Image (cartoon, coloured by chain):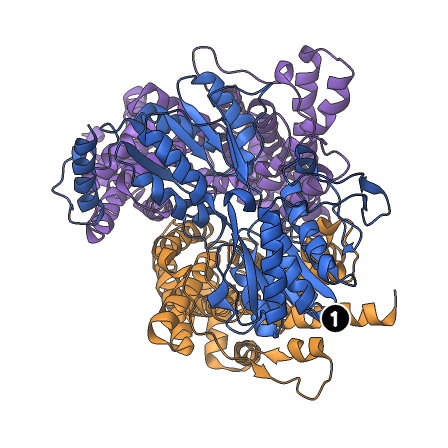
Chain colours: A orange, B purple, C blue
C-alpha cells in the first residue's frame, strides 16, 4: 500500500469520524443520562427520526436551521417525557415502551414527513477549520459542524456534573438505588422523567444533525437504525459520557473504512468493510468486557443489567 | 386465607382462575379500544373517516377468506420471531438479534440445498435437512450471544444487535459472490431449490406450513417453560440469577440453551421464508420480522402461547394496510402510527393489572 | 360508461381532497368498481422518494387520466410475500385486472406465480425479465434502457473532468447498475481516452449516510465528477455540490440541487410507456407482453444541462444523443473487463439481450463486483 493510498484512507477515516459520529454522540449522551437515572429508553431511534424530520420541516418553513435544531429537540422532549411518564406507572416495562415509542416516533415522522422529501431546506453551516491545509480531503474533513463541538461540550459538562454537581449526584443515586434516593428526599420518578425528557431532547438534536448537516436531507431511510445502535453504544461506553464520545468517533471512523477502501480500488468483500463498525465494536466488547467491571459501572436500578 | 381454602377449595380456585382470565382478556381489549379511540381522533384531525378506516381494517384483515389467509400468512414469521425474543426474556435476557438468525438460518437452508438438490437427494430427506441446518445455524448464532453473556459478560442486547448486522453482511457476501446463481441477474440470489423441494400450503388454504410450525412450537415451548425442570430453572434464573447460582442451578447451560432455542426459532422462520416463499436466499430475507418479533413478545408478556394471537393481530394490521392505502389515499406510514399507538397503550395498560376489584379473588365475600 | 367513470372520479377527488370527513359512507371511498380497467400499481418505496418510485408514480398520472381506467396504488411494499399478498389483495378486494409491479425483485417468484394463479389478470413488470418461452402469457415486461442516458452523462463528464477520474456511487452490482457504470465509462472514453471511472458499492438501494460517505471518499480520491445509481440520488448530488465537484443525476431531475456543478442526468421516461398503455386501454386493446426502448423511441432522456456543463460538453453530449437516436451501438467490441478478460467479443446492438446479463466492469473502471 503506497503512502498516498494510506493517507487517503486515514483522511477519510478522520473525516468520517467527525461527520458520522455526531448523531451517535447526541443519542448516546441522551441515553447515558436516562440510563444513569435508572431507566432505559430503547426508543431513541424514534426521537432521532422524528427530530430529523421536524428539523428539516422547520428549517424549510422558517429558513432558519437553528430553529429547526431547537424544534427537533422539543419533539425529542415530547417523546422522551411520554416515555418517562408512562414508565413511571407501576409494572410498565421501560424497554418495551421504548420499542413502542420507536415505532410511534418513526411512524409519525414518516406520516408527516412526506411533503419534505423533495424540497431543499437551509442547512447548518460548517466551520471551515482546515483552511491551513492544501489537501482538499483534509480541508473537507475539517469542515466541522458546530453541533459536533456542542456534543463534545455536552459530554464534558455531563462528565463533570455526574462527578461534582448536586444534580449529577441525584441522578446517579436515583439510578443506583431507589430506596437510597427516597431516603435522601429525592423523588425518583421526577428525576427519571426529567432525565428521559432531556435525553430525548439530545436525541432529537442528533436527528437535526442528520437532516440539516450530514448527509443533510430528509428521507425515510435517513437513520436506518443509527439511533438503536447509539443506544447500544452506551453499554459499550459503560455509561461514561467521555467514553461515549470515543465510541461514537470510533464507530464513525470504522464506518468510513468501507467507502475509503473502495475509493482507492480495494473493493473485494465490501460487505464486510461496510460492516466494519459492527465487527470492530463486537471484538472490542469481547476483548474488554468482564462481567465484574461492567457490572460495577452499571447503574444498579437498570433493568437491562439486573 | 387458609380457612377459606379448606372450606371451599374448588369453588375458590375456579372463581379466582376465572377472574384472572377475565382480567387478562378485559384489560388488553379495553386497551385496544382506547387505542382505536386515540387513532380515531388522529384521523378526524386529518379529515379522514375513522368508520371507513376500521371497516377497511376489518375487511382487509379478517373480512374475507382471502383476508384471513393473508393475515395468518403474515403472522407465521412473527410467531417464530416472537418466540425468539420470549424464551431468552424468560431467563432475563433482552436478546434483539432474531433478525440475524433468521437471515443466516434461511441462507444456510438455501446453501445446504444446493449440493443436496443437484445431487438428487430426495425431497423427503432434503427438506428436513434444510430445516435442521437453518435451526442449527440460527441456534448456534444466538447461542454464541448467550455464551458470550455468560462466559465473558458481554451484554447480550448489544452483541445480538451487532451480530445481526454481521449476519446480513455474511449473507450478502455469499449471495452476491460464491453462492450466486448466475441466472439471478438483477436480484442476486442463491440457486433456486426447485418446486419439488418447496414447502407447500396447508391443505385448503394458501397459508404455508410455517404457521402450523409456529403454533406447535409455541405450545411446545409453553410446556417446556412452565411444566419442566428446565423451564423452572430458567425462570428462576430470570428472576434472580444470583439466587439461581446459589441454588446450584446450571445457569450457564440454561442461558446458552435458551438463547440457542431462540436462535433455532428464528432460523426456522428463515427456513420457511426460503422454502415456502422465495425458493432461494437473497436480500429479501432482511424484512424486519426479527425486530417486529420483539414487540410481539412484549405484548404477549413473553408468554409463548400468547405470542400466537398477538402475532395474528400484527398480521392483520399489515394485511389491511394496503387496502387502506388504496381506498383512503393515505400513506403507508398510517399503519405505523396505528401500531405505535396500540403498542404504547397496550404496554401502559400493564399497570392496570390488579387495580380492579372485580378481577381480584373475593376472599372477603366467600368467607361469609 | 366513460361518462359515468368521469363523474365518479370527480366525486372521488372531492373525497380525497378532504371534503369528505366523517360523514361520508364507505361507498364514497376510493372504489374502483365503476371502471373497465382497474389498475393496481405497486411500489417498493415511498411514492415521493425523489427517485425510482417517484419517477413511476409521476408517470402513473397519465394512466389516471384515462376515463375507463381506475388506478389504485400501494407504496413501500417489500420484495417478500408481502408483495404477492398486496397484488392478490388488489385482485380479490378491489377487483384489479391489471397489475403494474415496479420493482426488480417482484418478478420472480411473485409476479410469475400470481400470473399463473390468476390467468384473467394482466401483469406487467418494470424490468426486462419476461421470457416468452417460459413465462405466462398474461405477464410481461416494460423497461427503459437508462444506460443510454448514462452514456450521454459519460460523454459530458469525460469532457468535464480534469483529473480524468469520474466517481460512481452504486447500490448493488446487478446488470442494470453495471451497464450504467460501463456506459458512463464508454461515453467518457469516447471523448477522452484517459478517462476512468471509480465505483463504490454501498450494498443498499437506500442508505443516505453511506452514500454521502461514498461521495466524500470519491471526492477525496480525486474524482471531480460524481454520478450514481441509487434509489434516491439527492444525497450524492448535494454532497458533490458541497465538495465543489461536478455531478450527473439519475432517475429524476436533480438540477436544482446543484446550481453550480450539475452537468446533466439520466432520466427514465416511463410516461412514454404509460401513455402507450393508456391509449391501448382507452381503445380497449391488449397490452403488449414486452416493451423496451431507449433514445430511439423516446423512452429515456437527459436532464436539461446545468451550470456545470461547458459548451463543448453540451455539444458532444447532444451529438451523442443524436447518435443514440440513430441506434448507434454503445458496446463496440471487443472489450475487456477490468481483470483483462475479453467479455464483449463483438459489437452488440443496444437492446441485445446478451447485455442484460452483464456481470463485469470494463477495463477503465476501478472497482470489484464481489
Front-lying residue, B238 or C263: C263
Q: Nearer the viewer, residue B11 or C194?
A: C194
Position of the N terminus of chain A, as image quadrant, is bottom right
Q: What is the total number of numbered labels drawn onto the structure image?
A: 1
Name above or below for residue C229 compared with residue B317: below
Q: Is residue B71 visible?
A: no
Q: Residue at x 26, y 41 (%)?
A: B328
Outermost residue to the left:
C23
Q: State the residue at coordinates (24%, 27%).
A: C33
Question: Residue farthest to the bottom?
Answer: A132
Vertical position of residue C73 compared to residue A128: above or below: above
Q: Which residue is mark 1?
A: C163
Q: Position of residue C269 (x, y in %)?
A: 47, 47
Q: Nearer the viewer, residue A228 or C236?
A: C236
In the foreground, C192 or A230 = C192
Question: SS at mark 1?
Answer: loop
Residue B231 sits above or below residue B339 on the image: above
Residue drawn at 39 percent across, 61 percent down: A116
Image position, residue A155 (x, y; %)? 56, 76
Using a 10 Å C-alpha cutoff, classify the residue at mark 1 as few (fewer than 14 neighbours), some (14 to 19) or many (20 or more).
some
* Residue C301 visible within the image: yes
Image quarter of residue B141: top right
Q: Is residue A232 left or right of residue B348?
A: right
Dot 1: chain letter: C
Relative to C339, is A98 on the left or the right? left
Q: Could you say where residue C306 lies in the image, as x and y percent from the top left?
A: 52, 68
Residue C30 relative to residue B129: left or right: left
Residue A27 x, y percent position in the rendering:
52, 65
Amino acid at each position: 500500500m503506497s503512502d498516498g493510498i494510506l493517507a487517503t484512507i486515514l483522511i477519510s477515516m478522520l473525516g468520517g469520524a467527525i461527520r458520522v459520529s455526531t448523531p451517535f454522540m447526541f443519542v448516546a449522551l441522551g441515553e447515558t443520562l436516562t440510563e444513569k437515572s435508572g431507566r432505559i429508553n430503547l426508543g431513541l431511534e424514534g426521537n432521532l427520526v422524528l427530530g430529523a424530520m421536524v428539523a428539516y420541516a422547520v428549517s424549510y418553513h422558517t429558513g432558519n436551521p437553528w430553529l429547526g435544531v431547537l424544534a427537533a429537540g422539543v419533539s425529542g422532549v415530547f417523546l422522551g417525557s411520554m416515555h418517562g411518564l408512562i414508565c413511571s406507572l407501576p409494572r410498565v416495562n421501560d424497554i418495551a415502551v421504548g420499542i413502542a415509542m420507536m415505532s410511534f416516533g418513526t411512524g409519525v415522522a414518516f406520516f408527516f414527513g412526506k411533503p419534505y422529501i423533495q424540497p431543499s431546506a437551509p442547512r447548518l453551516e460548517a466551520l471551515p477549520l482546515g483552511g491551513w491545509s492544501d489537501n482538499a480531503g483534509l480541508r473537507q474533513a475539517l469542515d466541522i459542524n458546530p453541533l459536533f463541538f456542542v456534543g463534545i461540550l455536552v459530554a464534558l459538562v455531563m462528565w463533570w456534573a455526574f462527578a461534582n454537581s448536586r444534580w449529577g449526584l441525584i441522578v446517579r443515586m436515583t439510578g443506583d438505588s431507589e430506596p437510597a434516593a427516597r431516603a435522601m428526599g429525592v423523588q425518583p420518578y421526577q428525576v427519571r422523567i426529567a432525565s428521559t425528557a432531556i435525553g430525548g431532547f439530545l436525541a432529537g438534536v442528533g436527528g437535526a444533525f442528520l437532516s440539516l448537516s450530514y448527509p443533510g436531507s430528509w428521507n425515510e431511510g435517513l437513520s436506518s437504525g443509527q439511533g438503536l445502535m447509539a443506544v447500544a453504544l452506551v453499554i459499550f461506553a459503560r455509561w461514561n459520557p467521555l467514553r461515549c464520545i470515543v465510541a461514537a468517533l470510533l464507530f464513525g471512523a470504522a464506518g468510513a473504512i468501507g467507502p475509503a477502501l473502495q475509493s482507492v480500488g480495494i473493493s473485494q468483500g465490501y460487505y464486510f468493510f461496510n460492516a466494519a463498525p459492527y465487527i470492530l465494536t463486537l471484538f472490542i466488547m469481547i476483548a474488554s468486557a468482564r462481567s465484574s467491571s461492567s457490572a460495577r459501572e452499571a447503574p444498579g436500578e437498570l433493568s437491562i443489567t439486573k | 386465607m387458609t380457612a377459606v381454602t379448606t372450606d371451599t377449595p374448588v369453588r375458590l380456585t375456579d372463581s379466582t382462575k376465572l377472574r384472572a382470565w377475565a382480567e387478562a382478556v378485559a384489560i388488553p381489549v379495553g386497551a385496544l379500544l382506547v387505542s382505536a379511540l386515540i387513532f380515531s381522533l388522529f384521523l378526524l384531525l386529518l379529515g379522514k373517516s375513522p368508520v371507513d378506516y376500521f371497516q377497511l381494517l376489518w375487511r382487509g384483515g379478517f373480512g374475507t377468506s382471502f383476508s384471513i389467509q393473508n393475515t395468518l400468512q403474515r403472522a407465521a414469521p412473527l410467531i417464530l420471531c416472537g418466540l425468539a425474543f420470549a424464551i431468552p426474556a424468560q431467563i432475563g435476557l433482552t436478546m434483539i438479534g432474531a433478525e440475524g438468525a433468521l437471515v443466516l438460518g434461511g441462507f444456510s437452508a438455501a446453501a445446504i440445498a444446493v449440493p443436496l438438490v443437484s445431487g438428487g437427494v430426495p425431497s423427503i430427506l432434503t427438506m428436513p435437512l434444510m430445516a435442521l441446518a437453518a435451526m442449527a445455524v440460527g441456534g448456534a448464532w444466538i447461542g454464541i450471544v448467550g455464551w458470550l453473556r455468560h462466559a465473558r459478560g458481554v451484554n447480550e442486547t448489544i452483541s445480538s444487535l451487532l451480530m445481526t448486522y454481521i449476519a446480513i453482511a455474511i449473507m450478502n457476501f455469499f449471495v452476491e459472490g460464491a453462492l450466486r446463481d448466475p441466472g439471478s441477474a438483477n436480484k442476486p440470489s442463491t440457486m433456486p431449490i426447485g418446486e419439488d423441494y418447496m414447502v407447500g400450503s396447508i391443505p385448503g388454504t394458501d397459508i404455508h406450513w410455517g404457521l402450523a410450525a409456529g403454533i406447535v412450537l409455541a405450545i411446545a415451548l409453553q410446556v417446556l417453560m412452565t411444566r419442566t425442570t428446565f423451564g423452572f430453572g430458567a425462570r428462576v434464573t430470570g428472576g434472580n440469577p444470583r439466587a439461581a447460582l446459589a441454588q446450584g442451578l446450571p445457569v450457564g447451560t440454561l442461558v446458552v440453551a435458551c438463547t440457542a432455542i431462540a436462535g433455532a426459532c428464528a432460523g426456522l422462520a428463515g427456513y420457511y421464508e426460503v422454502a415456502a416463499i422465495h425458493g432461494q436466499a437473497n436480500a429479501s430475507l432482511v424484512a424486519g420480522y426479527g425486530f417486529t418479533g420483539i414487540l410481539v413478545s412484549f405484548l404477549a408478556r413473553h408468554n409463548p402461547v400468547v405470542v400466537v394471537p398477538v402475532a395474528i393481530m400484527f398480521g392483520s394490521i399489515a394485511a389491511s394496510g394496503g387496502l387502506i392505502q388504496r381506498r383512503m389515499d393515505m400513506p403507508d406510514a398510517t399503519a405505523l402510527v396505528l401500531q405505535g399507538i396500540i403498542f404504547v397503550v397496550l404496554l401502559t395498560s400493564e399497570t392496570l393489572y390488579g387495580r380492579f376489584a372485580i378481577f381480584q379473588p373475593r376472599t372477603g365475600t366467600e368467607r361469609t | 360508461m366513460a361518462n359515468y367513470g368521469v363523474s365518479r372520479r370527480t366525486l372521488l377527488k372531492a373525497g380525497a381532497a378532504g371534503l369528505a370527513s366523517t360523514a361520508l359512507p364507505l361507498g364514497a371511498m376510493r372504489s374502483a368498481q365503476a371502471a373497465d380497467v382497474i389498475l393496481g400499481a405497486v411500489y417498493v418505496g415511498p411514492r415521493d422518494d425523489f427517485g425510482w418510485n417517484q419517477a413511476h408514480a409521476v408517470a402513473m398520472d397519465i394512466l389516471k387520466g384515462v376515463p375507463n381506467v381506475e388506478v389504485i396504488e400501494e407504496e413501500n411494499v417489500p420484495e417478500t410475500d408481502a408483495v404477492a399478498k398486496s397484488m392478490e389483495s388488489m385482485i380479490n378486494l378491489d377487483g384489479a385486472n391489471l397489475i403494474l409491479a415496479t420493482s426488480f425483485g417482484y418478478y420472480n417468484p411473485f409476479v410469475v406465480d400470481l400470473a399463473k394463479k390468476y390467468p384473467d389478470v394482466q401483469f406487467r413488470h418494470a424490468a426486462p425479465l419476461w421470457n416468452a418461452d417460459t413465462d405466462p402469457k398474461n405477464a410481461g415486461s416494460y423497461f427503459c434502457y437508462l444506460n443510454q442516458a448514462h452514456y450521454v452523462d459519460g460523454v459530458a463528464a469525460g469532457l468535464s473532468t480534469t483529473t480524468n477520474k469520474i466517481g460512481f456511487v452504486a447500490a448493488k452490482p446487478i446488470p442494470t447498475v453495471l451497464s450504467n457504470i460501463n456506459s458512463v465509462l464508454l461515453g467518457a472514453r469516447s471523448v477522452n481516452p484517459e478517462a476512468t471511472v471509480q465505483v463504490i458499492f454501498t450494498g443498499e438501494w437506500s442508505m443516505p449516510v453511506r452514500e454521502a460517505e461514498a461521495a466524500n471518499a470519491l471526492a477525496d480520491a480525486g474524482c471531480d465528477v460524481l454520478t450514481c445509481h441509487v434509489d434516491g440520488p439527492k444525497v450524492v448530488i448535494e454532497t458533490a455540490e458541497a465538495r465543489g465537484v461536478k455531478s450527473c443525476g439519475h432517475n429524476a431531475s436533480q438540477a436544482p440541487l446543484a446550481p453550480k456543478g450539475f452537468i446533466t442526468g439520466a432520466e427514465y421516461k416511463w410516461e412514454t410507456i404509460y401513455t402507450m398503455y393508456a391509449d391501448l386501454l382507452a381503445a380497449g386493446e391488449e397490452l403488449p407482453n414486452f416493451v423496451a426502448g431507449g433514445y430511439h423511441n423516446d423512452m429515456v432522456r437527459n436532464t436539461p444541462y446545468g451550470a456545470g456543463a461547458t459548451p463543448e460538453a453540451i455539444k458532444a453530449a447532444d451529438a451523442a444523443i443524436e447518435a443514440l437516436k440513430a441506434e448507434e451501438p454503445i458496446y463496440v467490441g471487443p472489450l475487456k473487463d477490468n481483470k483483462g478478460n475479453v467479455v464483449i467479443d463483438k459489437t452488440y446492438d443496444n437492446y441485445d439481450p446478451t447485455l442484460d446479463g452483464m456481470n463485469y466492469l470494463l477495463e477503465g473502471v476501478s472497482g470489484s463486483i464481489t
